[in-house]
């Protein structure tokens, strides 16, 4: 079962929700009997995020026995958030279109609209091209680096050669959609991430990454067998504009430590 922060937004429910996530008093004024429920809400932190700043679409999610923390507002500025938009591309309804240049993923719908999600594009993701399909989907997937990843960057990946079980510290996050071509796994994935700062940017590791809240939303919409199209740079410039087609910066890889993996339960 998935529970979002929407269920917790009414101040009267805040203090009864301690079992879902740890609330701690902020460094400001202590909560007293003179404060209203709303004032009390503004004086607590949820996993380090002020309650009053939590976006309803990116709040605490209880899923599969794990508690995903809220996404801080600093990562949700401008276009870097899920949005229902008029679809600007040329793909047919029921298609995922990935723009690795503007760092967007579109789920195209029949009414001319689309859900647009911000993404991060890792080195592996920049090699995606052509038409693919969703061949498999998984909740809280395990992850094992490919032999090519281990061979080319042993200092980054060799420690994970035995695989990483699904969980909060897994680089694939809460969901993974596996991209196939001709009935065979391409080893490209659309997946969640715990590296929040990478969204909207390029990274040295990973395929197509999303906020965990977004990849759960996408997973709930997209069936296995859905078509996936990759937008070219020329189309990205024509559709999104030159500035968006070149948005983001190159970031270093962020992978969990063995201790983080062991403690993420």
Image (cartoon, helix red, strand yellow):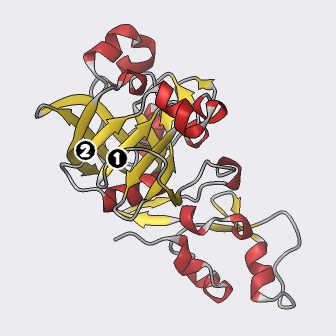
In the rendered view, tell whether residue 21 sits above or below residue 139: below
Q: Position of residue 45 (x, y in %)?
A: 70, 65
Mark 2 residue element: strand
Along the viewing direction, whichever of 48 and 197 lies nearer the viewer: 197
Q: Position of residue 46 (x, y in %)?
A: 64, 64
Side of 161 where 217 appears, left or right = right
Side of 34 where 4 appears, left or right = left
Query: From where the camera sits, is residue 166 visible?
Result: no
Q: Position of residue 173 (x, y in %)?
A: 40, 46
CA neighbours of label 2 inside 10 A, class few (<14), some (14 to 19), many (20+) = many
Residues at badges 2 and 1 in contact (C-beta under 8 Å)?
yes
Along the viewing direction, whichever of 116 and 68 lies nearer the viewer: 116
In the rendered view, tell whether residue 262 sits above or below residue 202: below
Q: Image quarter for residue 27?
A: bottom right
Label placed on residue 208:
none
Q: Which residue is mark 1?
A: 96
Q: Identify which residue is drawn at 45% across, 18% down.
A: 156
Q: Identify which residue is drawn at 50% across, 42% down.
A: 104
- Distance from disc 2 to disc 1, alpha carbons, whole Å, reads 6 Å
Identify the image quadrant of the N terminus.
bottom left
CA neighbours of label 1 inside 10 A, class few (<14), some (14 to 19), many (20+) = many
Along the viewing direction, whichever of 76 and 24 lies nearer the viewer: 76
Label placed on residue 227:
2
């Amino acid at each position: 079962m998935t529970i979002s922060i929407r269920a917790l937004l009414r101040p009267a429910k805040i203090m009864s929700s301690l079992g879902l996530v740890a609330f701690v008093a902020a460094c400001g004024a202590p909560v007293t009997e003179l404060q209203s429920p709303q004032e009390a809400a503004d004086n607590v932190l949820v996993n380090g995020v002020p309650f009053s700043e939590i976006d309803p679409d990116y709040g605490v999610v209880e899923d599969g026995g794990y508690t995903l923390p809220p996404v801080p507002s600093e990562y949700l500025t401008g276009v870097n958030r899920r949005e229902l938009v008029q679809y600007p591309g040329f793909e047919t309804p029921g298609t995922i279109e990935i723009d690795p240049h503007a760092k967007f993923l579109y789920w195209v719908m029949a009414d001319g609209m689309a859900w647009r999600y911000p993404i991060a594009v890792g080195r592996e993701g920049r090699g995606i091209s052509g038409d693919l399909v969703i061949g498999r989907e998984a909740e809280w997937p395990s992850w094992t680096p490919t032999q090519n990843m281990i061979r080319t960057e042993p200092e980054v990946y060799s420690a994970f050669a035995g695989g990483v079980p699904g969980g909060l510290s897994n680089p694939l996050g809460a969901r993974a959609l596996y991209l196939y071509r001709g009935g065979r796994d391409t080893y490209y994935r659309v997946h969640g991430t715990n590296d929040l700062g990478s969204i909207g940017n390029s990274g040295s590791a990973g395929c197509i990454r999303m906020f965990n809240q977004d990849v759960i939303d996408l997973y709930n919409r997209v069936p296995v067998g859905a078509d996936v199209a990759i937008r070219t740079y020329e189309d990205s410039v024509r559709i999104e504009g030159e500035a968006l087609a070149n948005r983001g910066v190159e970031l270093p890889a962020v992978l969990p430590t063995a201790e983080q993996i062991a403690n993420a339960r």
